[in-house]
Amino acid sequence: MPCLTRLVFLALIASRSIIVDAVSTNVDDAGARIADRVHLERHARGWTLADLAVRSGVSRATISKIERCQASPTATVLVRLAGAFELTLAGLIARAESDAEPLVRAADQPVWRDPASGYLRRQIFERADHPVELARIELPAGARVGFPSASYARVRQVVWVLEGKLVIKDAGARHVLATGDSLGFGSPVDTIFANETVETCIYLVIIARS
């Protein structure tokens, strides 16, 4: 390989590695900020680890590991912790990032990945003084994520599928949503989101606080 061509080739590989590392670091940093936020929210309420464990249904040992960044919380665990703080998952993630501004640039939208399922959540918009939240989800092929009914307390939400096919199971019902389909949620029930295909499913979650 000519010297110049080889240098260009190596530069391309290096630039790709930097991009991959940047995305990985962004997700890792988000996890650390969430851990700090869980700790702050608990202390702000004067709760012990045992208090939060009782209120959330998450074990004391797991909460301790999360706060010390020794374990990455799954989406289900984060939802339970957020519910104990009377926050939505979006609200907890947004607080972990910073105080939200009216204009949210794409580069500043918090991104978090569920270590258990690979579920990737981009928080497009969330503000404490605004009743609507918006998140973009990428659910990998074969993945499924469960959310307890507590995560839907005092909120209503709509799911809109942008790409692929999504299966939502709630209260014994099975809803199959294709690209362009939407589903509105009513009274809080335990819910499962599943991608039973071999392609990534992308959908929006629109939440309105009641």
Image (cartoon, rainbow, N blue to C red):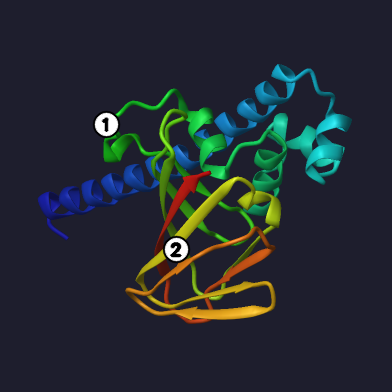
- Residue nearer the viewer, 155 or 135: 155
Give residue 149's position: percent from left, percent from top: 69, 56
Q: Residues within 10 Å of mark 1 (few under 14, many from 20)?
A: few
Q: Which mark is residue 159?
A: 2
Q: Residue at x 70, y 50 (%)?
A: 150
Disc 2 residue type (three-letter): Val
Disc 1 residue type (three-letter): Leu
- Residue nearer the viewer, 160 or 104: 160
- Residue nearer the viewer, 23 or 165: 165
Asked which secondary structure carries label 1, the reply is loop
Asked which secondary structure carries label 2, the reply is strand
Q: Residue at x 57, y 44 (%)?
A: 89
Residue occupied by mark 1? 103
Q: Please indicate, yes or no, whether residue 198 appears anywhere in the rendered image.
A: yes
Q: Residues within 10 Å of mark 2 (few under 14, many from 20)?
A: many
Q: Quadrant of the N terminus?
A: bottom left
Is 199 rendered above or below residue 93? below
> What is the quadrant of residue 35 in the picture?
top right
- Residue nearer the viewer, 57 or 139: 57
Give residue 77's position: percent from left, percent from top: 70, 48
> What is the quadrant of residue 193 in the picture?
bottom right
Q: Could you tell which of marks 1 and 2 lies nearer the N-terminus?
A: 1
Give residue 28's position: percent from left, percent from top: 52, 39
Is 31 rendered above or below residue 57? above
Horizontal placement of 153 versus 206: left or right?
A: right
Give residue 135's position: percent from left, percent from top: 42, 50
Horizontal placement of 129 versus 9: left or right?
A: right
The reply to whether the C-beta atoms of the residues labelled 1 and 2 are less than 8 Å apart is no
Q: Please indicate, yes or no, whether residue 73 appears anywhere in the rendered image.
A: no
